[in-house]
Image (cartoon, helix red, strand yellow):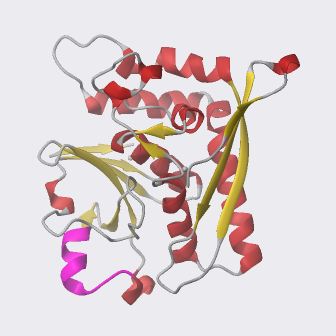
Amino acid sequence: MIWLIVTRKKGKSYQASDDDSKKIKREFNWKLDSSRGIGLKGHLELEFDEQAVLEQRRHNPFGRPSVNGWNYKVNLQEMYHYMLANPHHLAASAKIVQYINRICSQKGINEFDKLQFVLDFVQEPNIKYILDDRSQELAGAQEYIRYPDETLLDGRGDCDCKAFLAATLYHLMGYNVLYILSDKLAHAAICIEYDSHWGTRIGNPATLRNATIEINGRWYIYCETTSDGFRIGNIGKKESVKDFETILELRA
């Protein structure tokens, strides 16, 4: 196991005016999947500088030829530090966080449901799930983790792309996050630091055994970023967080 201290409802898209052809707008629509049946819908429009996102794509270490296989540890470290060194690449993610914080405050949504609302943003169908080799924008790459802006502009990504976006959003909200990868399951996901006050909203003790993990004295709980309908703590019946061999710790 590797330890590292670092972790659309289909939206419409359209081109901006001819006078500003390098700006591309994306529209996102999603709703809260609350265990308490709270009705909350999100609607957010983001604008991207296409060239700035292409700059990230050119810089993405997963876009480089790899003779000896992918080194996720090294590549994700590089991506994380690149974003920290270029905070303008986090502007779109910051706007998502600002919007979610604002609407949840206005509607009186509690912390747990707010975190679920973030997870719902990243899941299907708001961000479509697609394999890398079926993504034309990736030129047939076999394995590629998008930067958050890439995922948002493309409006799609596979499990590791969506997980990296979710990790970034939670990190910007001030939460400690794990980015986790499993060769056994051929899957990527995240965990966020667990608050004991969440109690029965998550599940029974048997469920928590498979969905939680302790790292450096902190307890984290599993979050599935791909399909719709997964709530915080939901994990496949035959799966466990302990199936994930690579764990990247992102501390707020």
* Residue 225 x, y percent position in the rendering: 40, 54
Please say if 51 is above or below 208: above
State the extent of the magenta-drawn residues as a range: 202-211
Is 203 within the magenta?
A: yes
The prevailing secondary structure element of the residues shown in magenta is helix
Q: Position of residue 167 (x, y in %)?
A: 45, 50
Query: What is the x, y in percent for residue 25?
Result: 72, 35
Q: How many numbered badges does the structure rendering display?
A: 0
Which residue is depicted at the point 51% across and 87% down?
36
In the rendered image, residue 252, in percent from the top left (x then y), is placed at: 51, 54
Which sits in the foreground, 179 or 146? 146
Q: Is residue 232 left or right of residue 203?
A: right
Residue 121 location, quadrant: bottom right
Establish if 59 lies above or below 128.
Answer: above
Residue displayed at 46% across by 53% down:
124
Q: Is residue 99 magenta?
A: no
Q: Nearer the viewer, residue 199 or 15?
A: 15
